[in-house]
Image (tube, coloured by chain):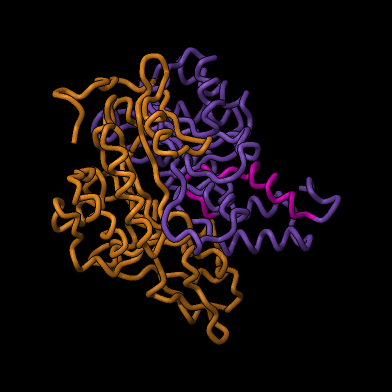
Chain colours: A orange, B purple
Amino acid sequence: MFIDQEKCSGCGICLPYCPAGAIKLVGKKAVVDRELCLECGNCGRKQVVRCPKDAFVEEPGLYEGVRAVRKFFSDPATTHKVTRIPGRGTEEVKTNDVTGRVRRGEIGLALEMGRPCLGTSMQEVQRVTMALAAHGVVFEENNPLTHLMSDRKTGAISTEYLKEKVVSVIIEFTDRAERLPLLLETIRKVARELDTVFSLDLIACFEDDGSLPVLETLNQLGMKPRPNAKINLGIGRPPAPLYREGGPCR
Amino acid sequence: MTHSLHRRGSPESLRDDYVLLATAAAGVNHEGSKDKLRRVLEIVYEEEPANVGSYETGTIYAGVSMEDIKASLAEVPRVRCCFSSREKMKRVLQRVKEMDLGISITVSGLIDEVLEMARELGIKPHSINLSLDIWGKKEELPSEEVLEFVTMCGHGLISKDLVEKCIADVRSGKRTPRQAAELIARPCVCGIFNPDRAENLLARYAPPGQEGEQ
């Protein structure tokens, strides 16, 4: 995004809205620092900032080339071409009752890199994907990040994207429930080296009696989930099978 | 990701804050589902949500009408909204369940409260997305008071600067808690930011006597 300097009145109304702090007043005009800008589109939405001079302009060619990564991983109003899902990840637990993405005996893990507040570079994302890939994690096909990888087996992201920075990237995968301790230990180790933060999600299915076996595993690890969560009520149709054919996935 | 499982704050401040997501699954049941989602939207609107919006239009707090939201449902349609009342949330779920649309529904909120509501409605939840908190360079984060607001946005579009400015405006009496809450709500495009909860949180900063002013 940039600001038409002819139109800008320098009122500064836009400054606090930028989640990346990329808008500054220089002289008597507002300018966007192109390096800091994550292309979330916030400032350009007429119903958000309400710039009295309508001075925000989207960069020509933004949806093509390397910088498009910023747009697709920062602006939820865009839809990734491959997944057809707006935003940065899959439908995770939202449609799990019909997709069967995570089934009994399995866990789904998602690391929302850069959330809250700090954003993330793709370089930081790669630190985590490579640490997880070393343990044989299979990254979610229906997640745009997976399609930026040059080697899914090592978790390497194509080098041209590594310097790009975005509001957030979601590293998602499904695995066998018994591997949760190993995966959380891997995540704990790599988290110490990061120059950003991530929010950690754990998806699991309820048993017939309403219990969640994964809670016992977390308890043994000395971990307690937060008291609030997102719950799939199981009223979607057609229902996915509760168990994966051939046993839990890898 | 909508991030609704990662809302920060005390259990008390998270009570009476429910996020409802109705989602057609891409490649599974999304074809022909727009009318079903429109019916969900109608029910949601009749039960007076705290907020509702869509990726395509923005939210009612950005000046978008319910008709705009209904008219612009995407190829893979979805409904995003939140409620500040357990009774309203429960009525929506009951009505959606009775319509048997086959659309996946998630509710985010305090786990015990959501599960209790499901039990009362005869619903057996399928799966859960638990929040295992924030990891990494947490020392770079703003204060918990600011995080309570920014984590109500599903996509990280509410800046800490806007929250800090609004808290300062409430402290100085320049804005009421409600005015500040509605200003913070604007950047959230999907409609899960709860301005009622934000107003309650902001009332802590209001000068004496102005905590509940509109």
Would you say residue B173 sits in the magenta stretch?
A: no
Query: Which residue shows up at 60% across the image and 45% down it?
Result: B9
Q: Position of residue B180 (x, y in %)?
A: 67, 54
Query: Which residue shows up at 48% across the image and 35% down it?
Result: A229
> Which residue extends farthest right?
B209
Q: Position of residue A166 (x, y in %)?
A: 36, 62
Up the image or down, A61 lies above or below B166; here it is below
Asked which quadrant contains residue A234, the reply is top left
Is B123 left, or right, of A98 in this rendering?
A: right
Query: Which residue shows up at 27% across the image and 44% down it?
Result: A84
Is A174 left, or right, of B98 in this rendering?
A: left
Q: Position of residue A85 (x, y in %)?
A: 30, 44
Up the image or down, A247 lies above or below A138; here it is above
Question: Count of labels shown?
Answer: 0
Region of the chain picked out in magenta, as a range: B187-206
Look at the image and tell me whether residue B19 can be seen: no
Tell me the quarter of the image containing the N terminus of chain B. Answer: top left
Query: Which residue shows up at 42% across the image and 18% down it?
Result: A210
Considering depth in this image, is A73 or A174 the residue closer to the camera? Answer: A174
Would you say residue B203 sits in the magenta stretch?
A: yes
Is A75 left, or right, of B158 in this rendering?
A: left
